[in-house]
Image (spheres, rainbow, N blue to C red):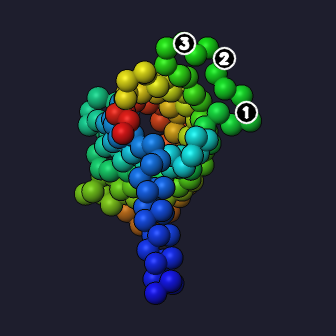
Amino acid sequence: MKKILLVAIMAIASVAYVNAQPRAIGANLGGGLGFSYQHGFGESNMLDVDVHLPLIGLFSSKYGVGANITYDWIDPFNAPVPWNNKGEWHWYMGVGGAGGMYSFADTWWYAGVAGHIGIEYDFWFPFQLSLDWRPSFGVSNWNGKMGFDLNGLYGIQLGIRYKF
C-alpha cells in the first residue's frame, strides 16, 4: 500500500512539474509561414519545434513541408540582454535536427542538423516577439540523386507567440 501511495504521489508531482513549465505557441514569417511551439525547462532551457511551409512563388519556387526541432539555451553564457524595461529581452541559441519534403512531384527530401539563434521580447502580457535565424544543412535526395543541402542557411524569421 505504501508503494502504491508513493508512486501516486510521484506521478502527480511529475505531472504538476511538467504543466508548470512555460510554453508558447505562435507563427513565424520569413521565406514561408511557420508554426512554432516552445516548451520551457526551467528558466534557462527550452525545446523549440518549428513546422514551416514555403511561400510558393513569392520567396521560393518550392512547396512542401519542413520541420526544425532544437534544444535552446536562454541567455547562454550568463549574458542577458542589458536593456529590460517593462517587458523582458532574452537571447537564445540551440542545436537540433531538421527535415522535410519539398516538390512532391519531384520527390525531394532533406535531413540534417539545425541551429537556432535569436532574440525575443516578452511583453508584460502573455505575448512575445522574436527574430530568429534557423540555419540548417545536411543531405538531400532529389529524384534519386543524393547531394548536400545548403538551402536552410537563409532561414531568418520574425515570430509572434502566445505564452501560456
Q: Residue at x 48, y 55 (%)?
A: 17
Above or below for 150 versus 76 = below
Q: Which of label 1 and label 3 is nearer to you?
A: 3
Amino acid type indicated by mark 2: Pro
Q: Residue at x 73, y 33 (%)?
A: 78
Residue 78: give its label: 1
Residue 7: which numbered mark, if any? none
Residue 85's disc is: 3
Q: Secondary structure at mark 1?
A: helix
Q: With 119 as the anchor, is 59 left or right in this view?
A: left
Query: For this rendering, which residue is in front, 99 or 48?
Result: 48
| Label number found at residue 82 | 2
Q: Can residue 47 be seen by looking at this rendering?
A: yes
Q: Mark 1 and 3 residues: CB-CB less than 8 Å, in contact?
A: no
Specify whether 95 is left or right of 158: right
Badge 1 crowding class, 10 Å Cα cut-off, few under 14, some 14 to 19, many 20 or more, is: few
- Give percent across and percent down for residue 148: 55, 54
Crowding at dot 3, Cα within 10 Å, few <14 / some 14-19 / many 20+, comes out as: few
Q: Which residue is depicted at the point 25% across and 57% down?
A: 105
Q: Residues within 10 Å of mark 2 (few under 14, many from 20)?
A: few
